[in-house]
């Protein structure tokens, strides 16, 4: 006759299990483990329990997840006692302590289990005892898991790192934006699981959705839709226009505040591409999916899916609006996983984009698409490969519509899209260029073959320098916000004879997504350029003109056009400049000691020829500011005067961290910096 264990309590051994499962940063409030790897719990028997032998004891464990656990959906598993656990499947074994007072139970989960909160129940001949709950995550340390990553340093970066860099600006002026991902901050994992529970697929069929959470491809696609709020009560509301309410996208310096706000009151206003991507990275890492934030400079938005960006102008050089556009930069995420739905050669990094641009399957989401498929032009592979291929590899054609209705091609480029694709380097704050992951070198034999495979028949012929007028824009060395400076349109005549043309030189404010704002400078002249010579047309950009029209991105788009109506010869070139911003000087006052107050002294020189109003500094750091930003308002700061403040904070965690700093005012917004902080005991 089998014996029944008389259990007093169950110890989930949170500390030791967390250590072996790389989940220590989540804290010790509950058991969080990674799938495909054993964990051990201890059953403490009541005093006076009679001696027993495990061989005479019959019990099983029931593991359940989701609101409708079913064996058929692999959301309910019954584990019978074995001599030892078995790799690759759910199994359990037990060992009796020599004292006879405790039983150690080892539980191995399947590396293909659905992630999420699981309940654990002991069943002894129908007598059931709840042993508690545990949260199961993807496991980059398990070779059988779809997200397995061989390199330990990469796992440290793409799963465990809570700070990072997001790159913005232009391909010639790339600047890193420090960001707090904070995936291990208190409450964040629960919010990430709540995002999965609020997605429309869960609402319509909870059983199917929870079962599908075994698959990182499925989870990543759900996150791509749920980080934006276009089709659902997703996390962020996008706004690329004038912002008069909510939080400006440039103000955010971490994901935690956004996720907490969403959990408390629904969609958060506002986000733009780097914010969408950063939050997606936080959620992916929290769930155990290796993830990196990627920036593409010169990012094409191909609205008609012809792999060609067509810019149409009238005879006066004014742009005729169309669906295609090129963003100065665009940010998305790459996630690491296998692709059993495709072929093993497409395993590895997969691009997905939570910024709402175009619909996929009727929903605003994008990806995951294999980087190897994108590089090789395999555009029939799931998901959304043509759109991402165009973002990094579309060709650009400039067209002019003549007064008689005829459309003439006058310029183009095969190289302006998909430049300096960037992500943070592993183990350092350096920028790593990963363009080679997405495309072959421009002009190489392999690139030609890929374009043919992608049916890119409109590729412009590669050519060397041709006869004609050549046009470029020359910048000045000092372009700091608040200063006046000159830029030049430079016309070179490679014809055999002199040419007379009209040069138009425009300057307009522009957002990072390519949306043009108001004009801040214009000049024109009719010039004669002798054969083989160069003419320069200066355009002075004054703060009085650009200061009130530029966005917080501090971008100005310069456009130069030459028009020779005699020969119907048009040339155009564009260059987007990012104005240099003042630096924030950060000095730490006092020792960085856990639970002891210290100060950060923050100083910024106002470079503008006018006062700043509503000035404030905001600081935030994982383990430094109790998970919340600290804001100090200082009012007005005169022209060329210093904004200065001291901010007090008390570190809560020992070890290295990063204090992020943001300066904001009415005319100078979202100036950011950071300093490393090593907190001692």
Image (cartoon, rainbow, N blue to C red):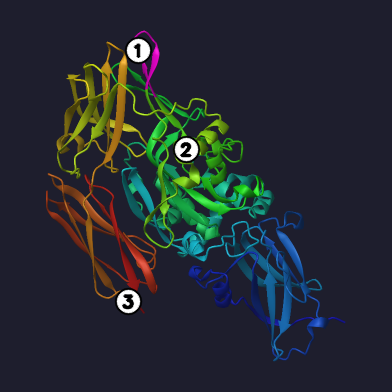
Percent of width and height locating residue 210: 65, 53
Percent of width and height locating residue 339: 63, 49
Looking at the image, is mark 1 or mark 2 earlier in the sequence? 1
Residue that carries the numbered disc 3 in the rendered image: 593
Name which residue lies at 34% across and 60% down. 629
The image quadrant where one finds the C terminus is: bottom left
Determine whether 117 is above or below 39 in the image. above
Q: Secondary structure at mark 1?
A: loop
Mark 2 against mark 3, which lies toward the viewer? 2
Residue 399 belongs to the span the image colors magenta = yes
Residue that carries the numbered disc 2 in the rendered image: 444
Q: Secondary structure at mark 3?
A: loop
Determine whether 9 is above or below 447 in the image. below
Boundaries of the magenta span:
398-410
Q: Quadrant of residue 503?
A: top left
Name which residue lies at 41% across and 36% down. 417
Residue 348 belongs to the span the image colors magenta = no
Mark 1 crowd level (few <14, some 14–19, many ≥20, 10 Å Cα): some
Considering depth in this image, is 67 or 12 the residue closer to the camera? 12
């Amino acid at each position: 006759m089998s014996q029944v264990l008389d259990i007093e309590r169950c110890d989930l051994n949170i500390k030791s299990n967390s250590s072996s499962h790389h989940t220590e940063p989540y804290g010790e409030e509950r058991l969080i483990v990674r799938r495909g790897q054993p964990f051990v719990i201890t059953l403490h028997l009541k005093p006076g329990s009679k001696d027993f032998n495990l061989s005479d004891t019959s019990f099983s464990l029931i593991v359940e997840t989701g609101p409708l656990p079913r064996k058929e959906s692999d959301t309910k598993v019954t584990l019978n006692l074995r001599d030892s656990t078995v790799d690759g499947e759910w199994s359990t074994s037990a060992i009796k302590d020599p004292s006879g007072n405790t039983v150690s139970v080892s539980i191995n989960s399947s590396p293909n289990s659905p992630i999420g909160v699981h309940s654990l129940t002991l069943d002894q001949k129908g007598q059931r005892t709840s042993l508690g709950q545990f949260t199961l995550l993807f496991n980059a340390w398990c070779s059988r898991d779809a997200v397995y990553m061989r390199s330990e340093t990469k796992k440290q970066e793409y799963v465990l790192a809570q700070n990072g860099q997001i790159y913005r600006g232009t391909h010639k002026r790339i600047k890193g934006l420090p960001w707090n991902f904070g995936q291990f901050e208190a409450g964040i994992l629960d919010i990430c699981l709540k995002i999965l529970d609020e997605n429309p697929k869960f609402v319509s069929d909870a059983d199917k959705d929870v079962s599908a959470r075994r698959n990182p491809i499925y989870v990543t696609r759900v996150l791509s839709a749920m980080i934006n709020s276009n089709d659902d009560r997703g996390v962020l509301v996008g706004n690329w226009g004038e912002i008069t309410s909510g939080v400006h996208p440039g103000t955010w310096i971490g994901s935690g505040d956004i996720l907490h706000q969403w959990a408390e009151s629904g969609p958060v206003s506002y986000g733009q591409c780097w914010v969408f991507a950063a939050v997606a990275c936080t959620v992916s890492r929290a769930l155990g999916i290796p993830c990196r934030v990627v920036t593409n400079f010169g990012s094409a938005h191909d609205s008609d899916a012809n792999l060609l960006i067509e810019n149409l102008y009238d005879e006066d050089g004014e742009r005729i609006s169309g669906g295609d556009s090129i963003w100065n930069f665009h940010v998305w995420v790459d996630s690491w996983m296998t692709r059993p739905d495709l072929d093993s050669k497409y395993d590895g990094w997969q691009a997905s984009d939570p910024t709402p641009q175009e619909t996929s399957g009727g929903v605003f989401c994008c990806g995951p698409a294999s980087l190897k498929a994108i590089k090789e032009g395999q555009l029939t592979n799931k998901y959304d490969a043509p759109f991402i291929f165009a973002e990094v590899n579309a060709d650009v054609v400039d067209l002019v519509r003549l007064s008689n209705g005829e459309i003439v091609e006058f310029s183009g480029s095969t190289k302006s899209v998909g430049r300096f694709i960037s992500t943070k380097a592993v183990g350092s704050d350096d920028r790593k260029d990963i363009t080679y992951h997405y495309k072959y070198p421009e002009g190489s034999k392999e690139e030609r073959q890929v374009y043919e495979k992608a049916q890119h028949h409109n590729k412009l012929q590669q050519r060397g320098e041709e006869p004609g007028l050549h046009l470029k824009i020359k910048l000045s060395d000092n372009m700091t916000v608040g200063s006046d400076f000159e830029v030049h349109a430079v016309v070179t005549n490679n014809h055999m004879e002199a040419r007379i043309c009209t040069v138009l030189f425009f300057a307009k404010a522009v957002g990072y997504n390519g949306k043009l704002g108001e004009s801040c400078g214009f000049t024109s002249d009719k010039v004669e350029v002798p054969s083989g010579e160069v003419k320069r047309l200066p355009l002075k950009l004054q703060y009085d003109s650009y200061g009130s029209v530029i966005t917080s991105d501090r971008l100005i788009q310069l456009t130069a056009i030459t028009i020779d109506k005699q020969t119907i010869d048009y040339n155009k070139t564009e260059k987007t400049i990012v104005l240099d911003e003042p630096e924030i000087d950060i000095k730490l006052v006092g020792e960085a000691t856990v639970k002891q107050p210290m100060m950060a002294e923050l100083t910024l020189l106002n470079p503008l020829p006018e006062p700043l109003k509503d000035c404030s500094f905001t600081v935030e750091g994982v383990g430094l500011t109790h998970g919340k930003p600290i804001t100090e308002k200082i009012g007005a700061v005169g022209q060329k005067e210093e904004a200065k403040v001291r901010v007090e904070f008390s570190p809560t965690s020992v070890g290295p961290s990063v204090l992020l700093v943001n300066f904001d005012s009415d005319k100078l917004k979202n100036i950011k910096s950071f300093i490393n902080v090593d907190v001692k005991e």
